[in-house]
Image (tube, grey):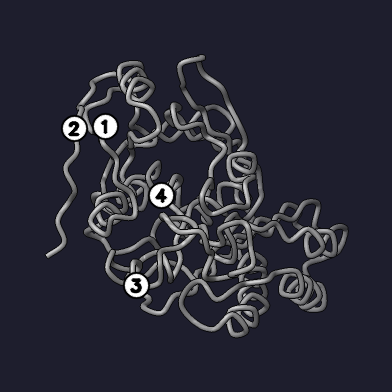
Protein backbone atom coordinates (compact mmCIF):
# COMPACT_ATOMS: atom_id res chain seq x y z
CA UNK A 1 0.00 0.00 0.00
CA UNK A 2 1.34 3.44 -0.94
CA UNK A 3 1.00 5.94 1.87
CA UNK A 4 0.94 9.71 1.84
CA UNK A 5 4.06 11.49 3.14
CA UNK A 6 3.80 13.63 6.27
CA UNK A 7 2.45 17.13 5.62
CA UNK A 8 0.78 20.03 7.41
CA UNK A 9 -2.82 20.75 6.46
CA UNK A 10 -4.60 24.12 6.40
CA UNK A 11 -8.33 24.68 5.75
CA UNK A 12 -8.89 28.39 5.07
CA UNK A 13 -12.41 29.76 4.68
CA UNK A 14 -11.68 32.76 2.47
CA UNK A 15 -9.73 33.40 -0.75
CA UNK A 16 -7.40 35.97 0.78
CA UNK A 17 -6.71 33.73 3.75
CA UNK A 18 -5.77 30.93 1.34
CA UNK A 19 -3.44 33.25 -0.62
CA UNK A 20 -1.84 34.45 2.62
CA UNK A 21 -1.07 30.88 3.70
CA UNK A 22 0.15 29.97 0.21
CA UNK A 23 2.48 32.96 0.16
CA UNK A 24 3.77 32.39 3.67
CA UNK A 25 4.49 28.69 3.17
CA UNK A 26 6.52 29.22 -0.01
CA UNK A 27 7.01 27.02 -3.10
CA UNK A 28 6.68 23.72 -1.21
CA UNK A 29 3.00 24.41 -0.50
CA UNK A 30 0.25 22.92 -2.67
CA UNK A 31 -3.46 23.65 -2.87
CA UNK A 32 -5.95 20.81 -3.14
CA UNK A 33 -9.61 20.74 -4.15
CA UNK A 34 -10.88 17.27 -5.08
CA UNK A 35 -7.46 15.66 -4.60
CA UNK A 36 -7.94 13.17 -7.44
CA UNK A 37 -4.53 14.01 -8.95
CA UNK A 38 -2.45 15.54 -6.14
CA UNK A 39 -2.84 12.74 -3.59
CA UNK A 40 -1.88 9.89 -5.98
CA UNK A 41 1.14 11.98 -7.06
CA UNK A 42 2.10 12.43 -3.40
CA UNK A 43 1.79 8.69 -2.76
CA UNK A 44 4.21 8.04 -5.63
CA UNK A 45 6.51 10.75 -4.18
CA UNK A 46 6.35 12.75 -7.39
CA UNK A 47 5.60 15.76 -5.23
CA UNK A 48 6.16 16.05 -1.48
CA UNK A 49 4.67 19.34 -0.30
CA UNK A 50 5.36 20.23 3.30
CA UNK A 51 2.00 22.04 3.42
CA UNK A 52 -1.32 21.23 1.76
CA UNK A 53 -3.99 23.94 1.65
CA UNK A 54 -7.50 22.54 1.32
CA UNK A 55 -9.90 24.77 -0.61
CA UNK A 56 -13.13 22.89 0.07
CA UNK A 57 -14.45 25.47 2.57
CA UNK A 58 -13.25 28.59 0.72
CA UNK A 59 -16.20 30.86 -0.08
CA UNK A 60 -16.68 32.30 -3.54
CA UNK A 61 -14.90 29.62 -5.57
CA UNK A 62 -18.00 27.71 -6.68
CA UNK A 63 -20.90 28.35 -9.00
CA UNK A 64 -21.83 28.60 -12.68
CA UNK A 65 -23.16 32.03 -13.62
CA UNK A 66 -24.51 32.84 -17.08
CA UNK A 67 -24.32 36.52 -17.88
CA UNK A 68 -25.97 38.79 -20.42
CA UNK A 69 -25.00 37.88 -23.96
CA UNK A 70 -24.06 34.31 -23.12
CA UNK A 71 -20.83 34.81 -21.15
CA UNK A 72 -20.18 32.21 -18.44
CA UNK A 73 -18.31 32.42 -15.16
CA UNK A 74 -17.29 29.11 -13.58
CA UNK A 75 -15.88 28.84 -10.08
CA UNK A 76 -12.76 26.65 -10.01
CA UNK A 77 -14.21 24.51 -7.20
CA UNK A 78 -17.24 23.60 -9.30
CA UNK A 79 -17.32 19.82 -9.59
CA UNK A 80 -16.90 18.21 -12.98
CA UNK A 81 -20.11 16.29 -12.39
CA UNK A 82 -22.14 19.47 -11.85
CA UNK A 83 -20.85 20.85 -15.15
CA UNK A 84 -21.60 17.57 -16.89
CA UNK A 85 -25.21 17.78 -15.70
CA UNK A 86 -25.67 21.37 -16.91
CA UNK A 87 -28.07 21.18 -19.88
CA UNK A 88 -27.38 24.78 -20.91
CA UNK A 89 -23.65 24.13 -21.01
CA UNK A 90 -24.27 21.09 -23.20
CA UNK A 91 -26.34 23.16 -25.62
CA UNK A 92 -24.27 26.35 -25.81
CA UNK A 93 -20.71 25.11 -25.14
CA UNK A 94 -20.78 21.60 -26.54
CA UNK A 95 -16.99 21.23 -26.75
CA UNK A 96 -16.50 22.11 -23.08
CA UNK A 97 -19.30 19.79 -22.03
CA UNK A 98 -17.78 16.93 -24.04
CA UNK A 99 -14.37 17.55 -22.48
CA UNK A 100 -15.76 17.53 -18.93
CA UNK A 101 -17.83 14.39 -19.57
CA UNK A 102 -14.74 12.56 -20.89
CA UNK A 103 -12.67 13.01 -17.72
CA UNK A 104 -12.00 9.83 -15.74
CA UNK A 105 -15.06 8.09 -14.21
CA UNK A 106 -18.40 9.34 -12.78
CA UNK A 107 -17.18 8.72 -9.23
CA UNK A 108 -14.03 10.79 -9.75
CA UNK A 109 -16.00 13.51 -11.57
CA UNK A 110 -18.09 13.81 -8.41
CA UNK A 111 -14.89 14.64 -6.50
CA UNK A 112 -12.76 16.38 -9.14
CA UNK A 113 -13.09 20.08 -9.92
CA UNK A 114 -12.65 22.06 -13.10
CA UNK A 115 -9.95 24.16 -11.43
CA UNK A 116 -8.04 21.00 -10.58
CA UNK A 117 -8.30 19.79 -14.16
CA UNK A 118 -7.12 23.15 -15.51
CA UNK A 119 -4.05 23.05 -13.24
CA UNK A 120 -3.43 19.32 -13.75
CA UNK A 121 0.24 18.36 -13.45
CA UNK A 122 2.02 17.19 -16.60
CA UNK A 123 2.41 13.44 -17.05
CA UNK A 124 4.97 11.07 -18.56
CA UNK A 125 5.58 7.33 -18.74
CA UNK A 126 8.92 7.79 -16.96
CA UNK A 127 7.40 9.96 -14.22
CA UNK A 128 4.11 8.27 -13.35
CA UNK A 129 5.66 5.18 -11.79
CA UNK A 130 6.31 4.27 -8.18
CA UNK A 131 9.35 5.65 -6.39
CA UNK A 132 11.40 2.44 -6.60
CA UNK A 133 10.88 2.19 -10.37
CA UNK A 134 11.98 5.81 -10.87
CA UNK A 135 14.97 5.36 -8.58
CA UNK A 136 16.12 2.38 -10.65
CA UNK A 137 16.53 4.68 -13.69
CA UNK A 138 18.09 7.46 -11.56
CA UNK A 139 14.90 9.53 -11.72
CA UNK A 140 14.04 12.01 -14.46
CA UNK A 141 14.47 15.70 -15.13
CA UNK A 142 11.06 16.57 -13.66
CA UNK A 143 11.53 14.68 -10.42
CA UNK A 144 15.00 14.71 -8.90
CA UNK A 145 17.15 13.55 -11.84
CA UNK A 146 19.21 15.27 -14.51
CA UNK A 147 17.96 13.46 -17.63
CA UNK A 148 14.73 13.65 -19.59
CA UNK A 149 14.33 9.98 -20.50
CA UNK A 150 11.90 10.86 -23.28
CA UNK A 151 14.60 12.92 -25.01
CA UNK A 152 17.91 12.26 -23.19
CA UNK A 153 19.74 15.05 -25.00
CA UNK A 154 17.13 17.66 -24.12
CA UNK A 155 17.57 20.37 -21.51
CA UNK A 156 13.83 20.58 -20.94
CA UNK A 157 11.19 18.17 -19.66
CA UNK A 158 8.82 16.64 -22.21
CA UNK A 159 6.07 15.50 -19.82
CA UNK A 160 2.72 16.15 -21.52
CA UNK A 161 -0.21 18.33 -20.59
CA UNK A 162 -3.12 15.90 -20.13
CA UNK A 163 -5.96 18.22 -19.13
CA UNK A 164 -9.13 17.70 -21.16
CA UNK A 165 -10.67 21.10 -20.42
CA UNK A 166 -7.62 23.22 -21.26
CA UNK A 167 -7.56 22.81 -25.09
CA UNK A 168 -11.28 23.60 -25.25
CA UNK A 169 -10.94 26.65 -22.99
CA UNK A 170 -8.15 27.92 -25.24
CA UNK A 171 -10.30 27.37 -28.34
CA UNK A 172 -13.21 29.20 -26.68
CA UNK A 173 -11.01 32.21 -25.83
CA UNK A 174 -11.46 31.77 -22.07
CA UNK A 175 -9.63 33.86 -19.49
CA UNK A 176 -8.54 33.07 -15.95
CA UNK A 177 -8.63 35.38 -12.94
CA UNK A 178 -5.81 34.84 -10.46
CA UNK A 179 -5.28 36.31 -7.01
CA UNK A 180 -1.85 36.66 -5.45
CA UNK A 181 -0.14 38.83 -2.84
CA UNK A 182 0.21 41.63 -5.42
CA UNK A 183 -3.53 41.57 -6.09
CA UNK A 184 -5.75 40.15 -8.85
CA UNK A 185 -4.79 39.74 -12.49
CA UNK A 186 -6.42 38.24 -15.56
CA UNK A 187 -4.74 36.22 -18.30
CA UNK A 188 -6.00 34.28 -21.29
CA UNK A 189 -6.07 30.49 -21.23
CA UNK A 190 -3.50 30.51 -24.02
CA UNK A 191 -1.16 32.72 -21.97
CA UNK A 192 -1.61 30.47 -18.93
CA UNK A 193 -0.19 27.57 -20.93
CA UNK A 194 2.48 29.44 -22.85
CA UNK A 195 5.33 27.43 -21.28
CA UNK A 196 6.79 24.48 -23.19
CA UNK A 197 8.65 22.76 -20.35
CA UNK A 198 6.91 20.01 -18.39
CA UNK A 199 8.49 21.13 -15.12
CA UNK A 200 6.94 24.61 -15.23
CA UNK A 201 3.75 24.07 -17.20
CA UNK A 202 1.79 27.11 -15.98
CA UNK A 203 2.48 30.83 -16.05
CA UNK A 204 0.43 31.06 -12.85
CA UNK A 205 2.88 31.99 -10.11
CA UNK A 206 3.27 29.61 -7.14
CA UNK A 207 1.71 32.17 -4.77
CA UNK A 208 -1.36 32.78 -6.95
CA UNK A 209 -4.76 31.14 -6.67
CA UNK A 210 -7.17 30.55 -9.55
CA UNK A 211 -10.43 32.29 -8.62
CA UNK A 212 -12.53 32.49 -11.82
CA UNK A 213 -12.81 30.83 -15.23
CA UNK A 214 -14.47 33.20 -17.70
CA UNK A 215 -15.82 32.04 -21.06
CA UNK A 216 -16.83 34.87 -23.42
CA UNK A 217 -20.04 34.82 -25.49
CA UNK A 218 -19.69 32.41 -28.40
CA UNK A 219 -22.47 33.69 -30.66
CA UNK A 220 -23.26 31.03 -33.26
CA UNK A 221 -19.81 29.39 -33.04
CA UNK A 222 -19.79 25.59 -32.82
CA UNK A 223 -17.28 23.49 -30.90
CA UNK A 224 -16.38 19.91 -30.10
CA UNK A 225 -13.77 17.84 -28.26
CA UNK A 226 -12.46 14.39 -29.14
CA UNK A 227 -10.17 12.24 -27.03
CA UNK A 228 -7.99 9.20 -27.67
CA UNK A 229 -7.05 6.87 -24.78
CA UNK A 230 -6.52 3.17 -24.22
CA UNK A 231 -9.47 2.60 -21.86
CA UNK A 232 -12.42 4.66 -23.03
CA UNK A 233 -14.01 4.81 -19.58
CA UNK A 234 -11.08 5.98 -17.50
CA UNK A 235 -7.64 6.91 -18.88
CA UNK A 236 -5.89 10.20 -19.44
CA UNK A 237 -5.73 11.28 -23.09
CA UNK A 238 -2.89 10.32 -25.41
CA UNK A 239 -4.44 12.86 -27.78
CA UNK A 240 -7.04 15.57 -27.31
CA UNK A 241 -8.52 17.60 -30.18
CA UNK A 242 -10.56 20.75 -29.57
CA UNK A 243 -12.21 22.41 -32.55
CA UNK A 244 -14.21 25.64 -32.73
CA UNK A 245 -15.60 27.14 -35.94
CA UNK A 246 -17.27 30.51 -36.56
CA UNK A 247 -19.30 31.08 -39.71
CA UNK A 248 -22.20 29.14 -41.20
CA UNK A 249 -21.39 29.51 -44.88
CA UNK A 250 -17.69 30.19 -45.03
CA UNK A 251 -15.33 29.80 -42.08
CA UNK A 252 -14.74 33.19 -40.45
CA UNK A 253 -12.54 31.88 -37.64
CA UNK A 254 -11.12 28.46 -36.86
CA UNK A 255 -9.54 27.24 -33.64
CA UNK A 256 -7.84 23.83 -33.64
CA UNK A 257 -5.99 22.90 -30.45
CA UNK A 258 -4.16 19.61 -29.80
CA UNK A 259 -3.30 18.32 -26.36
CA UNK A 260 -1.33 15.42 -24.85
CA UNK A 261 1.29 15.75 -27.59
CA UNK A 262 3.69 18.02 -25.66
CA UNK A 263 4.19 19.99 -22.44
CA UNK A 264 1.72 22.64 -23.65
CA UNK A 265 -1.36 22.56 -25.88
CA UNK A 266 -0.51 23.03 -29.56
CA UNK A 267 -2.40 25.44 -31.82
CA UNK A 268 -2.56 24.18 -35.42
CA UNK A 269 -2.01 27.56 -37.06
CA UNK A 270 -1.45 26.35 -40.61
CA UNK A 271 -4.57 24.20 -40.45
CA UNK A 272 -6.60 27.11 -39.07
CA UNK A 273 -5.40 29.41 -41.85
CA UNK A 274 -6.23 26.80 -44.49
CA UNK A 275 -9.89 26.83 -43.42
CA UNK A 276 -10.44 30.59 -43.41
CA UNK A 277 -12.75 32.00 -46.06
CA UNK A 278 -13.79 28.56 -47.29
CA UNK A 279 -16.87 26.43 -46.79
CA UNK A 280 -16.22 23.48 -44.50
CA UNK A 281 -16.11 21.01 -47.40
CA UNK A 282 -14.60 17.55 -47.41
CA UNK A 283 -11.57 18.87 -49.32
CA UNK A 284 -11.03 21.72 -46.83
CA UNK A 285 -11.30 19.30 -43.92
CA UNK A 286 -8.83 16.86 -45.49
CA UNK A 287 -6.29 19.63 -46.10
CA UNK A 288 -6.60 20.97 -42.55
CA UNK A 289 -6.26 17.47 -41.09
CA UNK A 290 -3.06 16.84 -43.06
CA UNK A 291 -1.57 20.17 -41.96
CA UNK A 292 -2.42 19.52 -38.31
CA UNK A 293 -0.73 16.11 -38.38
CA UNK A 294 2.33 17.38 -40.25
CA UNK A 295 2.96 20.09 -37.67
CA UNK A 296 2.71 17.89 -34.55
CA UNK A 297 5.59 15.89 -33.06
CA UNK A 298 4.39 13.46 -30.37
CA UNK A 299 7.20 11.73 -28.48
CA UNK A 300 7.59 8.46 -26.60
CA UNK A 301 6.32 9.80 -23.29
CA UNK A 302 2.87 8.29 -22.93
CA UNK A 303 0.75 5.33 -24.01
CA UNK A 304 0.93 4.07 -27.63
CA UNK A 305 3.70 4.56 -30.19
CA UNK A 306 4.43 8.15 -31.28
CA UNK A 307 4.04 7.22 -34.96
CA UNK A 308 0.52 5.86 -34.32
CA UNK A 309 -0.43 8.91 -32.24
CA UNK A 310 0.71 11.16 -35.08
CA UNK A 311 -1.53 9.27 -37.52
CA UNK A 312 -4.41 9.65 -35.08
CA UNK A 313 -3.99 13.44 -35.13
CA UNK A 314 -5.03 13.47 -38.77
CA UNK A 315 -7.90 11.06 -38.13
CA UNK A 316 -9.32 12.91 -35.13
CA UNK A 317 -8.90 16.45 -36.47
CA UNK A 318 -10.92 15.25 -39.46
CA UNK A 319 -13.54 13.70 -37.17
CA UNK A 320 -13.71 16.85 -35.05
CA UNK A 321 -14.27 19.10 -38.08
CA UNK A 322 -16.90 16.74 -39.45
CA UNK A 323 -18.62 16.78 -36.04
CA UNK A 324 -18.62 20.60 -35.96
CA UNK A 325 -19.99 20.71 -39.54
CA UNK A 326 -22.87 18.46 -38.55
CA UNK A 327 -23.92 20.63 -35.59
CA UNK A 328 -26.84 22.99 -35.93
CA UNK A 329 -25.88 26.65 -35.42
CA UNK A 330 -26.16 27.71 -31.78
CA UNK A 331 -29.04 30.12 -31.32
Question: Closer to us: mark 1 or mark 3?
Answer: 3
Q: Is residue 249 visible?
A: no
User: Could you tell me which secondary element the residue under label 3 belongs to?
Assistant: helix
Side of 314 relative to 211 (left or right): right
Q: Which residue lies under the disc numbered 3?
A: 136
* Label 3: few (<14), some (14–19) or many (≥20) C-alpha neighbours in 10 Å: few
* Distance CA(mark 2)–CA(mark 1): 6 Å
| Of pointers 2 and 4, the one earlier in the residue sequence | 2
Gap between marks 2 and 4, in whole Å?
Answer: 21 Å
Residue to which mark 2 is pinned: 9
The residue pinned by badge 4 equals 117
> Which residue is denoted by mark 1 in the rendering?
53
Q: Nearer the viewer, mark 4 or mark 3?
A: 3
Find residue 46 and report its image quarter. bottom left
Where 60 falls versus 258 (above or below)? above
Residue 100 left/right relative to 240: left
Gap in angstroms between the C-alphas marked 3 and 2: 31 Å
Is residue 305 among what the camera can see?
A: yes
Amino acid sequence: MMRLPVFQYHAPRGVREAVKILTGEGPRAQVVAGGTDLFPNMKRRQVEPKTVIGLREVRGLRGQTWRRGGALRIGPLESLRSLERNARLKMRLKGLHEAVASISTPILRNMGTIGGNVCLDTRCFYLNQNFEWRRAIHHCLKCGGDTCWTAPGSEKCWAVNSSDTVPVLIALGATFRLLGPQGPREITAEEMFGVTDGREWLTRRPDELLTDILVPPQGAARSTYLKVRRREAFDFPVLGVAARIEGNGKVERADLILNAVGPAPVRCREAEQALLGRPLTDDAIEEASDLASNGAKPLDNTDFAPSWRKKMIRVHVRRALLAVRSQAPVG
